[in-house]
């Protein structure tokens, strides 16, 4: 009998929860769920509703060929989402913002932008104002303040008719992760949902008058950010309860990158006020309290080759006219050295709730605004994300996951107790158990990780999986790197957090700073030594695998030890000097190494020492770790290790149309098939079997 973990087609078909929102009264939780489409070549999202008290069953709210995502909730409980589904006129060229009434009925579009809508940035808890992002062409500026919509539509039409795809860049960078930046620029627009009318109630032009440049039954968007260039590509923000002021983290252009600043924008006038802007400091994750009297954000001094810095949590008073009292700004949680990934104000605004990596988990923390010590609210083996607080009642909901279960919705009480909610994506039965393992490195530092064990007594072959980042932690479920698939094939999987990992304090991170090949490598070897000493692990059958930074480390391992029978390196850094000038964020990567650190920790210098068979995997659309890294690695393996007839024990799996992660379900299947065939050959001693779909 096959299971989703023994059969890759079943695995890719498992539905996946990937977004969450909560009704203002706390009664309902809204989820986005991705499911395999009919062609089995992509995923389609839909919106679901579940009761927040733990009872009932999930109810599907949307269904369309294009799917829906980016959910948010209005003050009245209506659900906002972004979708490319056809609107009332039948047009479906670009994704628009839609609203689904809380009282029932059909979803309706609320925008009709030529370039589409990006996503909801913020909703106001006391008004119908919505802030959202949208791409606009920089050449679409017009003489009057309301015709930018028509100008953008006209310019897009001309580019399409002339089949022009060229992009002119005036600043760095030019691309991000897996897509080109431009020609359009991200803007922040606002609209008032109270202005939404029925289509048949729209005002029509008089006879002989020009047709309006925007549907009159829709709320007309206002542009809060004219001529933004690339400063809003990663904008984050929150609205005051009355919707009059937007607090936002906005980038300021630097020679080869940006710094993040904190600004306020008057929604009525568009007047922008810079609140906090410091050289070599980023101000991010801006939040506004439920009563509109306090703001909170994260302040982070820039990292240098000397080390990373703390991420500081700050608050400041917000006056009734929307002005931030800069003099009243103060830092809280000064003794807490974790890095918050999420911040929200709790009900009553006496504290912030945060999610941060912690010892291989990602708990929820309570951070009092009065300076009292930080409290860890949840004490379990789960990683939380998508933290949401109901504006009206204070119900706290989130998604959680572990290596034994994918994301699913939960409600968290004030005492930290957790209620599991109904989910449209039932949790699958996994073919493994999991243990927390740890050892002591040579410098006396504790190094820990997770050990996923297959069924049976063993001894089991072992796979060392090295996480990416490097500022990261192996603390929750991954669909792209699933140890459960390996466990179903009899492998034990070690998921360690070496130096540079988050969740163990700043000193632990800085042990590996500017020295990637030092403490991170020795930590990995130390915990591997510890685990292979167990009677249920077969020390003679081991392999190492990693992606991104994990791929870098897999390359480093290959050049420094022959203890593994096989090494899989995915989207990996190979030649640091080359990588640092071609990645999409070169300023950051060059800033964290000095010249000596870059040279001493460059894995390509050790290519001649590689004796372990390597499977190299890379996607051509990977702009974070460009394809040149994989091409150079493959070329240098051939230069040093190919036989006279060109044959090698190594393999190169290349995806012309995939990015850093390899996301298409059919390609994920090929990825796993190739990886497991390579491991079976070299770790288990089986004959090489080429995956059928590779031709």
Image: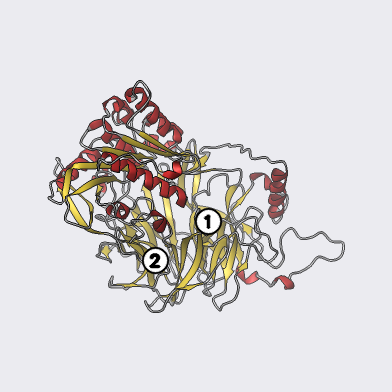
Around disc 2, counting alpha carbons within 10 Å, would you say few (fewer than 14), some (14 to 19), or many (20 or more)? Answer: many
- Front residue of 605/589: it is 605
Q: Which mark is residue 233?
A: none
Q: Quadrant of residue 498?
A: top left
Q: Is residue 433 visible?
A: yes
Image x and y of residue 44, in percent: 51, 60
Residue shown at the point (40%, 27%) measured from the top left: 635
Image x and y of residue 295, in percent: 43, 61
Image x and y of residue 197, in percent: 68, 72
Check the image and report above or below for 554 versus 459.
above
Residue shown at the point (52%, 67%) measured from the top left: 124
Check the image and report above or below for 338 versus 647.
below
Residue shown at the point (23%, 35%) measured from the top left: 518
Tag 1 residue: 39
Q: Which mark is residue 345?
A: 2
Pick the quarter of the image with the N terminus.
bottom left
Q: How is the image coloured?
A: secondary structure
């Amino acid at each position: 009998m096959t299971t989703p973990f023994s059969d890759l087609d079943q695995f890719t078909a498992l539905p996946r929860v990937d977004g969450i929102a909560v009704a203002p009264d706390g009664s309902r939780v809204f989820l986005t769920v991705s499911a395999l489409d009919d062609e089995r070549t992509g995923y389609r999202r839909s919106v679901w509703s579940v009761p927040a008290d733990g009872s009932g069953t999930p109810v599907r709210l949307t269904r369309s060929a294009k799917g829906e995502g980016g959910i948010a909730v209005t003050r009245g409980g209506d659900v906002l989402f972004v979708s490319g589904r056809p609107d009332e006129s039948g047009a479906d060229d670009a994704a628009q913002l839609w609203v689904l009434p809380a009282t029932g009925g059909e979803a309706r579009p609320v925008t009709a932008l030529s370039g589409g809508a990006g996503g909801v940035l913020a909703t106001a808890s006391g008004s119908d104002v919505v802030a959202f992002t949208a791409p606009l062409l920089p050449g679409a500026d017009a003489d009057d303040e309301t015709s930018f919509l028509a100008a953008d539509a006209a310019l897009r039409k001309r580019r399409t008719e002339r089949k022009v795809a060229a992009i002119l860049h005036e600043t760095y960078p030019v691309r991000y992760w897996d897509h080109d930046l431009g020609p359009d620029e991200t803007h922040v627009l606002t609209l008032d949902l109270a202005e939404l009318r029925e289509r048949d109630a729209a005002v029509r032009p008089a006879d002989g008058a020009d047709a309006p440049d925007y549907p009159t039954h829709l709320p007309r968007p206002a542009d809060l950010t004219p001529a933004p260039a690339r400063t809003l590509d990663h904008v984050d923000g929150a609205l005051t309860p009355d919707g009059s002021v937007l607090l936002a983290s906005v980038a300021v252009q630097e020679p080869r990158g940006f710094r993040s600043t904190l600004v306020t924008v008057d929604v009525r006038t568009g007047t922008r006020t810079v609140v906090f802007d410091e050289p070599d400091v980023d101000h991010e994750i801006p939040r506004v309290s439920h009563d509109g009297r306090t703001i909170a954000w994260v302040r982070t001094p820039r990292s240098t080759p000397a080390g990373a810095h703390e991420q500081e949590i700050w608050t400041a008073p917000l006056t009734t006219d929307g002005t931030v009292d800069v003099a009243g700004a103060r830092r809280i949680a000064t003794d807490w050295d974790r890095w918050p990934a999420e911040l929200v104000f709790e009900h009553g605004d006496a504290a912030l709730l945060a999610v941060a990596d912690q010892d291989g988990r990602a708990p929820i923390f309570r951070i009092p605004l009065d300076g009292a010590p930080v409290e860890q609210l949840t004490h379990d083996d789960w990683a939380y994300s998508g933290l949401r607080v109901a504006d009206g009642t204070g119900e706290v909901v989130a998604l959680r996951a572990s290596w034994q279960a994918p994301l699913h919705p939960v409600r968290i009480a004030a005492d930290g107790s957790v209620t599991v909610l109904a989910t449209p994506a039932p949790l699958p039965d996994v073919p493994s158990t999991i243990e927390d393992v740890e050892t002591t490195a040579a410098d006396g530092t504790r190094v820990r990780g997770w050990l996923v064990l297959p069924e049976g007594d063993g001894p089991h072959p072992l796979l060392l999986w090295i996480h990416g980042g490097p500022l990261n932690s192996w603390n929750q479920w991954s669909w792209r790197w699933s140890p459960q698939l390996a466990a179903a094939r009899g492998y034990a999987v070690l998921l360690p957090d070496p130096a540079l990992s988050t969740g163990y304090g700043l000193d632990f991170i800085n042990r590996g700073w500017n020295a990637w090949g030092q403490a991170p490598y020795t930590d990995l070897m130390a915990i591997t030594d510890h685990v292979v000493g167990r009677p249920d692990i077969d020390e003679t059958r081991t392999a190492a695998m990693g992606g991104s930074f994990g791929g870098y480390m897999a390359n480093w391992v290959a050049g420094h030890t022959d203890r593994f029978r096989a090494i899989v390196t995915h989207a990996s850094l190979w030649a640091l000097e080359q990588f640092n000038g071609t990645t999409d964020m070169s300023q950051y990567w060059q800033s964290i190494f000095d010249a000596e650190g870059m040279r001493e920790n460059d894995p390509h210098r050790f290519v001649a020492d590689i004796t372990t068979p390597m499977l190299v995997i890379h996607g051509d659309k990977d702009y974070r770790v460009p394809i040149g890294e994989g091409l150079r690695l493959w070329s240098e393996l051939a230069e040093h290790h190919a036989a006279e007839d060109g044959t090698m024990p190594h393999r190169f799996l290349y995806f012309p149309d995939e990015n850093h992660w390899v996301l298409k379900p059919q390609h994920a299947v090929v990825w796993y098939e190739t990886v497991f065939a390579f491991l079976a050959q070299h770790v288990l001693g089986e004959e090489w079997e080429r995956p059928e779909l590779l031709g």
